[in-house]
Structures are given as C-alpha cells and as structure tokens.
C-alpha cells in the first residue's frame, strides 16, 4: 500500500520538484518548443551533410577478415553505400582491456538488417592484428563483419574511433562523411534514453540540478566487475562481455592483465 504525503508538493531531496499534472504539462510544452527547434536544426544539418563533396580513393586496397585479405570494395556486399565504425584497439591487451567506449558502440550495432534494407552495408574496422581481433569477436559473440586495417592508410585505416560513410559507383569508391567523439553517440541508443531520465548519464560533465547523484568520467558505467558493480581495473571489463548470452566470469580468469 502506498501513502500520499499530506502536502503533495513536498520536495524530495535530490529529485525533481513535485507538481500537479497541469503544471508539469505546461513545463513540458515549453520544453517541447526547444526540442522541436533542435530536431529541425538536426534535419538541416543532415541536409547539409548530404551536400558535402566526396573524395575518391583506391577501393582495391586490401583489408583482412575471416577469409583473409579482401579488397575494400567487398565490404559493400554489392550495395552502393557503406557505413563503418573504426574500433580502437590495444595490442596484446586481454579482452577486458579493450576500449569500453568502442565496445559500447559496437554492441549497439549487433547487425545491420535495417541498414541493409535501405541499401547500406555495415562493417567494423580496427587496427588490431587479425588473430587477436578474431579471438575478441568470437568471445564477444559479435555478428557484424569485422576487418583488420592494420598498416592501411586513411580513409580506410588511419585514426580509429570514427564513424565513416562511403559511396560506391561501380568499381569507384568515395569517402563522403566521417565523425568522432560526441558524433558517435547517434549509434548508442542507450545514451539517448539516459538523456531523457531525471538522473541523466551519470557523467561528471553534465549540467545537473544540485543534489542529484554524483557523476563520474564518461563510460564509467559501461565497465563493471562480475557482480555488475561499475569499476575499473583487472577484474573489470565492458558490460556486454558479462551480459552476452553464454558469458561467464571464468572466461577471463586466464586473461587478467594491465588496464588501458
């Protein structure tokens, strides 16, 4: 049985102010005006993005996947458009030592069936040696196409941590767009949902009202120990590695190592 305080507007420490539905609706409607303006500006940015020039490069450059070296053109899988995520890589690190941010991004794109339906292929590229990458992909249970671009020049290789788009015209290949940092967030639906909650992402940079839970560094909550507690160090690893089907803590007992 729940109880109702005698004063329904009694403040609750560290939580939003309490109001009646009409007051909440008025505040919500006021915020909606700003949200709609934000949406329209996003549409305008997307329109500008579609008008960027493009850069041609050699599509026969080879990347390494499960079947050995293949030309970059193969990643299009016969489609005209391709989106890749460039996953950062730490050579020789245990599985739990790989980038928690990149792990989060990759986990949110387990497959690309909806992209494929729009004529767009998807792949993950990384600079790791294929032998290490293949082991990691198997451990994580990833189903996306992964390729090593070690020693491959940009725009196929180069700096990692980017979302990059390519266009194919027959055997000709073009770079059309690339983004990194906060630009990668559009892949991570969890961040968008957290931004809707009263406690937000739980990151220190956020502008939160006084009294809300203290924030930590970005990606803090994406790394945990076997019991699900957010932590860093040799007993932790990116959350999906604990939660994927079939994963057990035993899988990393022999892989403890230095933290990156």
Image: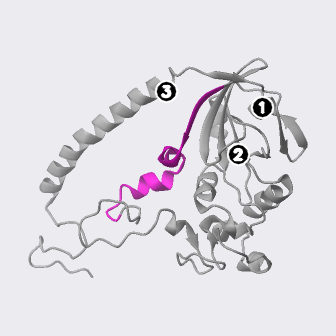
Q: Is residue 36 above or below residue 126?
A: above
* The magenta segment: 175-199
Q: Which residue: 64% across, 69% down?
A: 243
- N-term-proximal mark, 3 vs 1: 3
Packing grade of label 2 (10 A; few <14, some 14-19, many >=20) is some
What is the quadrant of the N terminus in the image? bottom left
Of helix, strand and loop, which one carries label 2?
A: strand
Q: Which residue: 77% across, 54% down?
A: 128
- N-term-proximal mark, 2 vs 1: 1
Image side of residue 55 versus residue 53, left or right: right
Disc sitting over residue 77 in the figure: 1
Depth order, front residue of 241/237: 237
- Nearest-to-viewer mark from 2 and 1: 2
Of helix, strand and loop, which one carries label 3?
A: helix
Q: Which residue: 45% across, 29% down?
A: 46
Image side of residue 115 versus residue 75, left or right: left
Image side of residue 207 versus residue 204, left or right: left
Disc sitting over residue 65 in the figure: none
Q: Which residue: 45% across, 24% down?
A: 48
Q: Which residue is mark 2?
A: 124
Q: Is residue 192 magenta?
A: yes
Q: Is residue 15 magenta?
A: no
x, y percent for residue 137: 77, 57
Q: Which residue is mark 3?
A: 49
């Amino acid at each position: 049985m729940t109880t109702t305080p005698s004063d329904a507007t009694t403040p609750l420490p560290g939580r939003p102010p309490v109001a009646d539905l009409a007051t909440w609706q008025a505040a919500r409607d006021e915020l909606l005006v700003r949200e709609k303006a934000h949406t329209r500006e996003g549409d305008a940015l997307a329109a500008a993005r579609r008008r960027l020039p493009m850069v041609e490069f050699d599509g026969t450059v080879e990347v390494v996947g499960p079947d050995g070296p293949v030309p970059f053109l193969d990643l299009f899988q016969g489609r005209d458009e391709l989106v890749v995520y460039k996953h950062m890589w730490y050579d020789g690190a245990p599985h739990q030592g790989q980038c928690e941010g990149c792990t989060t991004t990759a986990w949110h794109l387990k497959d690309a069936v909806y992209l494929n339906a729009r004529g767009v292929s998807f792949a993950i590229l990384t600079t790791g040696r294929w032998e290490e990458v293949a082991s990691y992909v198997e451990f994580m249970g990833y189903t996306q196409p992964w390729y090593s671009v070690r020693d491959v020049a940009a725009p196929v290789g180069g700096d990692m941590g980017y979302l990059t788009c390519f266009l194919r015209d027959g055997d000709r290949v073009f770079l059309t767009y690339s983004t990194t940092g906060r630009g990668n967030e559009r892949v991570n639906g969890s961040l968008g949902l957290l931004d809707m909650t009263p406690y937000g992402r739980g990151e220190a940079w956020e502008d939160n009202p006084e009294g809300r839970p203290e924030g930590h560094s970005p990606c803090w909550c994406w790394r945990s120990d076997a019991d699900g507690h957010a932590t860093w160090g040799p007993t932790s690893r990116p959350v999906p590695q604990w939660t994927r089907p079939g994963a057990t803590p035993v899988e990393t007992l022999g892989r403890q190592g230095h933290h990156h």
